[in-house]
Amino acid sequence: MKFYYTVNWTKTLYFNFKKFPFSTAKKLPVFFYGKIHFQNIKGQIIINGPIKTAMIGYGQHFETATKSKGIAEFSLFGKLVFNGYSHFGKDVILYIGKNAYCEFGYMSCLGSDVKVVCTNKIIIGDWSGIGYESQIIDTNSHPMKNTVTGEHYPMSGPIYIGTHNAFSNRISIMPNTKTPDYCVIASNTLCNKDYTNLGNNILIGGIPARLIKNNYSRDWENEKELLKKYKVIEL
């Protein structure tokens, strides 16, 4: 009964029947928990794979803190793709702009207070989790120029997060970031370039990020079943 009381049934029913064909909507694949504001949901949402009830959770309480500020916001103007189960914590702000593309891999996760701003392209790989109070932003938001030549710098750049990435808290992922598979990112790090040349099983960190340690990885094989237990809702 406690679970049923945490679901925002009004937003859950409205979103599913607004965005999916009836055969999909009746299974309620997307659940919203707690207070959330829909700024716009006119964009496209696609779920690849078998459709299951509550396979995508927005506003889930799977972290130590249980209180919510009630500031969660969802804005869908472009295209949003889920490749299976995905889980978002409390107070997440997700913005996908017009003509933008955002993709979440299987068992991908956003912690509480994470902000995602997608105006170009953001792809997050399977089993990759973004720690609380982090931000993923693929745009500078304002036109910037070289004051000598007058040349304007690109306003946005795609972001590619590899599979099995473990992001700590308060990390900033900026335009043109690309991480390898099996990558760990330390707290309070700024990522703003391609790190795939560093190889897999690495720890990076700093402002801007640099290689800290090789042969370093989260113990995914021993954690996968535990993560499924605490994040996947079966009804």
Image (cartoon, rainbow, N blue to C red):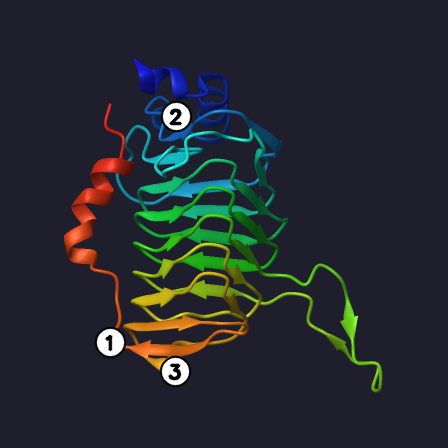
Give the mark, 2 or 1, whose residue is nearer the N terminus: 2
From the viewer's perspective, is 65 left or right of 116? left
Give the alpha-carbon distance from disc 3 to disc 1, as whole Å. 15 Å
Q: Which amino acid does label 1 sit on?
A: Asn
Is residue 118 found left or right of 142 in the rendered image?
left
Q: Which quarter of the figure is the C terminus placed in?
A: top left
In the picture shown, does residue 69 fall above or below 26? below
**Element at label 3:** helix
* Image quadrant in which the N terminus is located: top left
Is label 3 or label 2 in front? 3
89, 176: nearer the viewer: 89
Where's residue 145, x and y in %? 79, 75
Kindly identify the residue that appears in the image at 30 percent across and 54 percent down. Answer: 127
Rounded to the nearest angstrom, the CA distance separating label 3 from label 2 is 42 Å
Image: 27 above or below 170: above
Which of 106/89 is in front?
89
Q: Which of marks 3 and 1 is nearer the N terminus?
A: 3
Mark carried by residue 25: 2
**Picture residue at 37% right of the left edge, 41% below the top:** 87
The residue wearing badge 1 is 215
Give the amino acid type for the residue marked by disc 3 in the picture.
Asn
Residue at 54 percent of width and 65 percent of height: 158
Q: Where is residue 13 in the image (x, y as percent from the top left)?
A: 45, 20
Mark 3: few, some, or many residues within 10 Å (few <14, many ≥20)?
A: few
Label ID, residue 197: 3
SS at badge 2: helix
